[in-house]
Image (cartoon, rainbow, N blue to C red):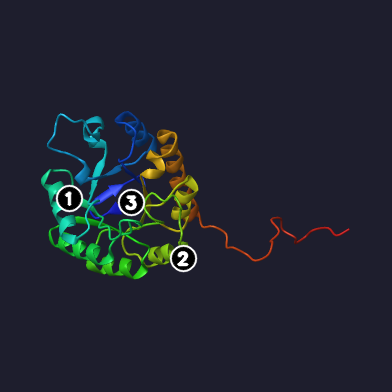
Amino acid sequence: MLRIGNYTFESRLLLGTGKFSDLEVQSQAVEASGTEVLTFAVRRLNLEDRNKQHFLDTLDLKRYTLLPNTAGASTAEEAVRIAELARASGLCDMIKVEVIGDGITLLPDPIETYKACEILLEKGFTVLPYISDDVILAKRLQLLGVHAVMPGASPIGAGRGIINPYNLEIIIEQAVVPVIVDAGLRAPKDAAHAMELGADGVLLNTAVSGSGDPAKMAKAMRMGVEAGRLAYEAGMIPVKRYAAASSPVEGMVHT
């Protein structure tokens, strides 16, 4: 079971709801993914215009936990306002803190992210910060009291997979809260790799919504996450420099 704050989930795949071609395709992908957590940008969801249909109208929300995010924020103050709007709308008190510091790489601003988390924790939110694969920042945020850390595998939407597995391994090794690998994944092998490293889950959006068949890709990612987790729990053989015979050599008859 994946436990984040007071929430418990069976699925370790979290799914973003943006960039799908239409709501039907989105619904099919959500179903195929087996996810229990749906994340979305609060600033891109007009909760007041009831004439415009959005994913909240097409999904059985009793089956899912919503994870609003603060995408579009560039300062801690903006992120806090967006989080408060989401909670005031009755969506969820769990928030993915996303404060972008660079418009080209879309990498998160570590200082503003830390400030936002500090304020939101004081306000009683369940806080999940999106960060770069920064080992020290991950540690500092956990000492602050966040409920999970979400290091990116590579820049948002880049599809480069895990660029720095070493840093992710260290973050996971030192973690006292769940580590959800977020951003930059492309293929099921990337999701499996993250889970093999010991991540507690992965969050995907573009890898699914931008694929040729989102529902099929969502299923593939689901299987990748499950396979990677099973491999991690089973314990993989160590990497060796030279070959090692798969059959025992003791007792063999020499001719």
Q: Which residue is pictured at 37% across the width and 35% down the height? A: 29
On screen, 104 above or below 212? below
Q: CA distance from mark 2 to mark 3?
A: 23 Å
Residue 129, image x and y in percent? 27, 58
Q: Is residue 125 visible?
A: no
Hey, what amino acid is under mark 3? Leu
Q: Is residue 211 visible?
A: yes
Circle 1/circle 3 CB separation < 8 Å = no
> Can you tell which quarter of the image residue 77 is in?
bottom left
SS at mark 2?
Answer: helix
Q: Quadrant of the C terminus?
A: bottom right
Q: Which residue is pictured at 45% across the width and 62% down the height? A: 164
Left or right: where 252 falls relative to 208: right
- The label on residue 2 is 3
Residue named by callout 1: 93
Considering depth in this image, is 236 or 165 the residue closer to the camera? 165
Q: Nearer the viewer, mark 1 or mark 3?
A: 1
Considering depth in this image, is 228 or 26 the residue closer to the camera? 26
Left or right: where 190 falls relative to 118: right
- The label on residue 166 is 2
Considering depth in this image, is 108 or 119 the residue closer to the camera? 108
Residue 180, image x and y in percent? 35, 55
